[in-house]
Image (cartoon, helix red, strand yellow):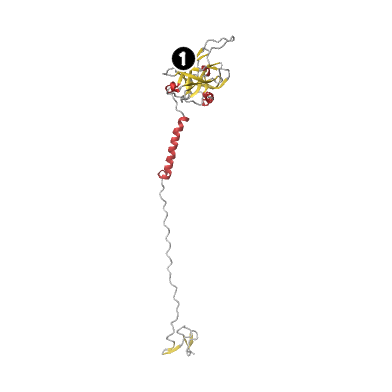
Amino acid sequence: MPFVPCLNCGRPMELAQDACPACGAPVVQAASGPLSAASAPPPVVAAPPPVVAPPPAASPPPPVVAAPAVPWWRRPNIIIPALFGAGCAVVLLALTLPSLFPSSLTPQQIYARYAGSVAEVRATLPGQTDVFGLSGEPQEVLGTGFVVSKDGYLLTNAHVVSESGQAVDSVTVLFRDGAPVQGTVVGADESTDVAVIKVDPASVPGLTPIPLGDSSNVVVGEQVVAIGSPLGLDLSLSSGVVSATDRDLDSPNGTVISGGIQTDAAINPGNSGGPLIDASGRVIGINEQINSQSGGNEGIGFAVPIDTAARVMRSMLAGL
């Protein structure tokens, strides 16, 4: 039996069959031979998968271009705080340096600045009583003092205003270009040879204290000046150097004054109680005694350290 293909599914079937045994489509006769029904749907042909174009390759990111570096001096967040800090440092340095490194003054400058703060001190001490109870003649003592307070306080030596532990009540104080004024002895300590005098500041207008230094920092060789009234020659200036430190000095009552300053600046009777001033214009000692074979200056003078004098003065003023 001859076979023909089914027009619907393409399977072979016998020519005598009325329908395709595979898909069931009816077979019709045509002049050219048996055909499947005209109404039979055309064979289903699977559509080829759509051609999908591959996605375009991702373009590389643009290169990162670093911003040009800005110098630190052109950055406000850096330069402004830096300038402010530098300005504060300059101001602080300007305020601190003068106290750390005081400028050196010449003897002429020291005298011009502080001669008006030094005064001649005259005291009349009672005569000593002898073994028979008879009093001797009163003794006039000449010395020097210097202003340490605008309130009218002066420092001097105890042996200028006292004798054998007995201080006079009042002294005469003579400042430069001024009339003599009365001063009161606040206290006298013969163990350190330090005394404090008080004058009425209203009677001496324009009192200028001489700043006190630090005698613990005194070194041998530094320049010093002494201002006083040697032998009654008021407001005389002498200059020299610190010859030695830490000398033991004899006080009026026989005790030892430690830390004494030795100088070759000329010191004579009448200089007692005057200031020994260093090159920065600060008092480092109170001129107190000389070591002499002739009774006059031989280049060996001594001063009570100002640290000791300041301590005694504070104690005296605290007791007022």
x%, y% of residue 169?
Answer: 51, 17
The single residue placed furthest to the right in the displayed view is 131
Q: Position of residue 34 (x, y in %)?
A: 44, 89
Q: Residues within 10 Å of mark 1 (few under 14, many from 20)?
A: some
Q: Residue at x 43, y 35 (%)?
A: 91
- Amino acid type, mark 1: Gly
Q: Nearer the viewer, residue 43 or 159?
A: 159
Residue 117 position in % (x across, y down): 45, 22
Task: Check the image and report above or below for 57 versus 150.
Answer: below
Q: Is residue 320 above or below residue 96?
A: above
Q: Is residue 309 left or right of residue 84?
A: right
Identify the residue position indicated by label 1 in the image.
232
The relative height of residue 202 versus residue 41 in the rendered view (above or below) is above
The location of residue 243, given as percent across then percent down, is 51, 21
Viewer-closest of 113 and 163: 163
**In the depicted view, which residue is nearer to us: 177 or 202?**
202
The answer to whether any part of residue 95 appears in the image is yes
- Residue found 46% across the figure and 14% down from its top: 232
Q: Is residue 128 left or right of residue 57?
A: right
Mark 1: which secondary structure? helix
Q: What is the number of callouts on the image?
A: 1
Q: Residue at x 45, y 37 (%)?
A: 89
Q: Would residue 224 be visible to someone looking at this image? A: no
